[in-house]
Image: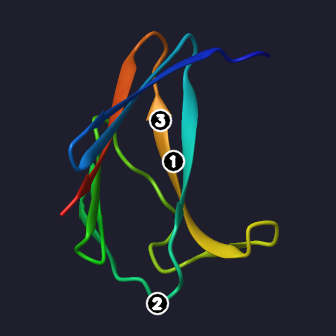
Amino acid sequence: DELNFKIVYTFVGDELEIAITTEKDSVYKLPIIADKNAEIKLISQNEINFRNILAITASNEIKTEDLSKRYFNQVGGFEYLPLEIPLKANGTVKIKFTVK
């Protein structure tokens, strides 16, 4: 099955907002570059903070296997934390990145 997404990026000051709309229930996968020593805190089901520098908030729940687990990307040579945000058919999910 083919999935069609509409993604709108909005940059304002120290914030980036990504608005995602899709026709079918699906999951938006977001790899966040973070080495294994990076301090990451789950503030709520919808908010994660990285090193008290970057906050990621979403209008839906942010899911991850384990905040301490990282994956290594051999192509880029970096470690990342995989985040997943569920998307409902014909709904819009907003993800906001704020630099503190």
Name the residue beneath numbered marker 2.
37
Q: x%, y% of residue 42?
A: 28, 67
Relative to residue 63, is residue 5 drawn left or right? Answer: right
- Check disc 3 and report its element: helix, strand or loop: strand
Q: Residues within 10 Å of mark 1 (few under 14, many from 20)?
A: some
Which residue is found at the position 35% from the left and 82% from the top? Answer: 39
Examine the rendered structure and indicate whether residue 15 appears above or below residue 50. Answer: above
First reached walking from the N terminus: tag 2 or tag 3: 2
Q: Is disc 3 in contact with disc 1, using a CB cutoff of under 8 Å? A: yes
Q: x%, y% of residue 70?
A: 59, 76
Quadrant of the image containing the C terminus: bottom left
Name the residue beneath numbered marker 1.
84
Identity of the residue furthest to the bottom in this view:
37
Q: In whole angstroms, how far apart are the C-alphas of marks 2 and 1?
A: 21 Å
Which residue is found at the position 50% from the left and 74% from the top? Answer: 34
Residue nearest the viewer, comparing 9 with 27 = 9
First reached walking from the N terminus: tag 2 or tag 1: 2
The dot on residue 86 is 3
Label 2 vs label 3, nearer the camera: 2
Q: Is disc 2 in contact with disc 1, using a CB cutoff of under 8 Å? A: no
Examine the rendered structure and indicate whether residue 80 appears above or below residue 63. Answer: below
Q: Amino acid at mark 1?
A: Glu
Q: x%, y% of residue 89?
A: 49, 14
Q: In whole angstroms, how far apart are the C-alphas of marks 2 and 3?
A: 27 Å
Residue 45: tell me if it is visible.
no
- Check disc 1 and report its element: helix, strand or loop: strand
